[in-house]
């Protein structure tokens, strides 16, 4: 996926808002394969302003529960990834597609894996050789604890899904502040 500068995104948004060219013609004019990013940039700009178009200085992390709530909302309402992202205050809508793919391919456990390659600190380099051995040496008790934790997460998710299904608007209002405070926390 191509990375576009903030200036380029803003230029296309402004050009679209001028009303002379639509999404498809703008994409053709700037030799883009698809107009979808332009549509997303316009919506993000309308909701968050210039800040929404900027690349994040730090990678934001989201809890498994938050990811499940976002995916549940999208499935129940039939909202697009972009519209769902705007409801939950997410400026990177394609990330939702990645969560959806991870859930389908690996279940809730896959949503708990950090994205990207971990940094190779000296400690990591030393432990890299031992990691493979440690993975195999999980005790039966540790495996059960991990399975219990995943089951607890699933039960909690189902409870929240039920509450959401009973009163979607009330649920979203109740949890809106919680989600927005999580969005502002920098990752470690």
Image (cartoon, rainbow, N blue to C red):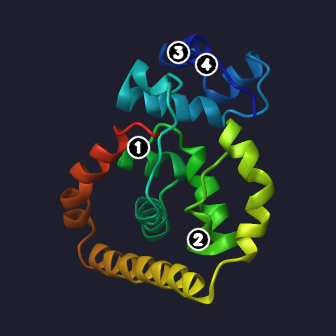
- Frontmost of labels 3 and 2 is 2
Task: Give the crowd class for mark 4: few <14, some 14-19, many >=20 residues within 10 Å.
Answer: some
Camera-side residue: 9 or 112?
112
Left or right of residue 151: residue 88: left
Q: CA distance from mark 2 to mark 4?
A: 44 Å
Labelled pair 3, 1 in contact (Cβ < 8 Å): no
Query: Could you tell me residue 112's position as x and y percent?
Result: 55, 62
Displayed quadrant of residue 28: top right
Counting residues from the start of the chain, the first of labels 2 and 4 encountered is 4
**Label 1 sits on residue:** 86
Counting residues from the start of the chain, the first of labels 3 and 1 encountered is 3
Query: Could you tell me residue 179's position as x and y percent?
Result: 31, 51
Q: Tell me the SS state at disc 1.
A: helix
Camera-side residue: 57 or 5?
57
Q: Tell me the SS state at disc 4.
A: loop
Asked if residue 174 is positioned above or below residue 137 in the image, the reply reads above
Left or right of residue 68: residue 107: right
Query: Could you tell me residue 121's position as x and y percent?
Result: 67, 36
Counting residues from the start of the chain, the first of labels 4 and 3 encountered is 3
Residue at 48 percent of width and 85 percent of height: 148
Q: Is residue 18 visible?
A: yes
Q: Which mark is residue 109?
A: 2
Q: Which mark is residue 21?
A: 4
Query: Could you tell me residue 59's position as x and y percent?
Result: 52, 36
**Label 3 sits on residue:** 10
Counting residues from the start of the chain, the first of labels 4 and 1 encountered is 4
- Frontmost of labels 2 and 4 is 2
Q: CA distance from mark 3 to mark 2?
A: 37 Å
Q: Quadrant of the N terminus?
A: top right
Q: CA distance from mark 4 to mark 3?
A: 15 Å
């Amino acid at each position: 996926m191509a990375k576009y500068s903030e200036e380029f995104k803003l230029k296309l948004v402004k050009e679209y808002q001028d009303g002379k060219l639509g999404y498809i013609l703008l994409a053709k004019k700037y030799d883009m394969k698809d107009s979808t990013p332009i549509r997303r940039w316009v919506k993000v700009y309308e909701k968050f302003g210039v800040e929404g178009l900027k690349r994040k200085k730090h990678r934001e992390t989201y809890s498994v529960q938050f990811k499940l709530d976002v995916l549940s909302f999208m499935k129940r309402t039939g909202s697009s990834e972009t519209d769902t992202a705007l409801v939950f205050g997410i400026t990177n809508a394609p990330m939702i597609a990645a969560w959806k793919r991870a859930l389908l391919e690996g279940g809730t456990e896959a949503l708990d894996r950090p994205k990207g390659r971990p940094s190779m600190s000296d400690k990591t380099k030393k432990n890299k050789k031992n990691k493979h051995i440690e993975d195999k040496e999980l005790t039966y008790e540790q495996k059960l604890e991990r399975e219990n934790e995943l089951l607890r997460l699933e039960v909690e998710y189902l409870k929240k899904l039920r509450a959401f299904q009973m009163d979607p608007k009330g649920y979203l209002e109740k949890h809106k502040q919680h989600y927005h405070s999580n969005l502002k926390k920098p990752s470690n």
